[in-house]
Image (cartoon, helix red, strand yellow):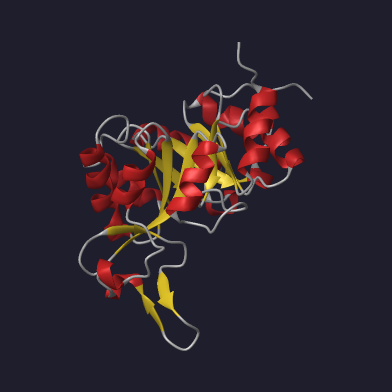
């Protein structure tokens, strides 16, 4: 197999929900550990509280089995202590890492961008907002000019085909497309690269999955196993 080079060398290594395989997910502890283990990027899901605070959690609900409540119904101070705000994440790890946020509530996008702008440094340019509706991303492009936007989707959702989607993303200024690792091939990454769009792959948990994506020109990988991910990227793209 002919190796395809990525547009971004080395690719970003996103620690999925922090160092999820090594510490409780979406906690400051997990994010700090991911940085110590060598992750060049962090990943989480962003929600908005009732009092307008951007917080990081996967499911967007809190409480026990008998009484669960959506985060949007609760004030920041009413959330469990382990759920961090985006501002607290930047305070803990700084702005020197890429940050991929899966926007689960569209209303959380603008507050998240505001936090990144307030954090300063490289935070805005290294913030990647992922959303499953590329039409919404088009609407965000102008007001969120300082950050990166990612079409988080599946090939089957591209009704007009991936080449048409790549052309649309390029015309709209959407920076990247994020697909499951199983949907990428050298031909597919080359297609999006032809339109100057970056190719991101998620659910890269095993060494062979990481190696396969790095061989087909992926620009970023998402993994729970930060140690495996860091080693795979270093092997594929050794430092000079």
Tell me where residue 134 appears, x and y as whole percent. Answer: 40, 48
Q: Nearer the viewer, residue 91 or 140?
A: 91
Furthest-top residue in this view: 240
The image quadrant of residue 83 is bottom left
Q: Nearer the viewer, residue 95 or 174?
A: 95
Image quadrant where one finds the C terminus = top right
**Residue shown at the point (26%, 34%) measured from the top left:** 146
Q: Is residue 20 above or below residue 92?
A: below
Furthest-right residue in this view: 1
> Is residue 11 toward the left or the right of residue 117 in the image?
right
**Residue shown at the point (76%, 39%) measured from the top left:** 208
> Is residue 183 toward the left or the right of residue 131 in the image?
right
**Would you say residue 152 is visible in this rendering?**
no
Q: Nearer the viewer, residue 81 or 178?
A: 81
Tell me where residue 178 appears, x and y as whole percent. Answer: 52, 43
Tell me where residue 19 appears, x and y as whole percent. Answer: 55, 48
Tell me where residue 140 appears, x and y as whole percent. Answer: 28, 45
Furthest-bottom residue in this view: 66
Q: Is residue 121 above or below residue 149?
A: above
Q: Nearer the viewer, residue 137 or 120?
A: 120
The image quadrant of residue 103 is bottom left
Image quadrant where one finds the N terminus = top right
**Residue shown at the point (34%, 35%) measured from the top left:** 95
Q: Is residue 10 above or below residue 152?
A: above
């Amino acid at each position: 197999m002919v190796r395809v080079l990525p547009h971004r060398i080395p690719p970003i290594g996103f620690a999925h929900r922090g160092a999820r395989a090594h510490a409780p997910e979406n906690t400051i502890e997990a994010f700090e550990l991911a940085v110590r283990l060598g992750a060049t990027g962090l990943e989480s899901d962003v929600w908005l509280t009732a009092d307008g605070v951007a917080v990081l959690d996967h499911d967007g609900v809190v409480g026990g089995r008998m009484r669960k409540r959506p985060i949007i119904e609760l004030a920041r101070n009413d959330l469990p202590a382990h759920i961090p705000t985006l501002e607290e994440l930047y305070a803990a790890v700084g702005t020197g890492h890429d940050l991929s946020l899966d926007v689960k509530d569209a209303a959380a996008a603008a507050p998240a961008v505001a936090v990144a702008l307030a954090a300063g440094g490289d935070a805005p340019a290294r913030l990647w907002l992922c959303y499953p509706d590329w039409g919404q991303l088009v609407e965000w492009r102008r007001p969120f000019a300082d950050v990166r936007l990612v079409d988080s989707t599946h090939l089957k959702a591209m009704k007009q085909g991936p080449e048409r989607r790549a052309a649309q993303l390029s015309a709209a200024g959407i920076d990247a497309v994020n697909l499951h690792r199983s949907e990428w091939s050298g031909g597919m990454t080359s297609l999006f690269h032809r339109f100057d769009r970056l190719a991101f792959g998620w659910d890269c948990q095993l060494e062979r999955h990481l190696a396969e994506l790095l061989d087909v020109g992926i620009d970023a990988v998402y993994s729970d196993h930060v140690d495996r991910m860091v080693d795979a990227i270093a092997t594929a793209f050794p430092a000079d």
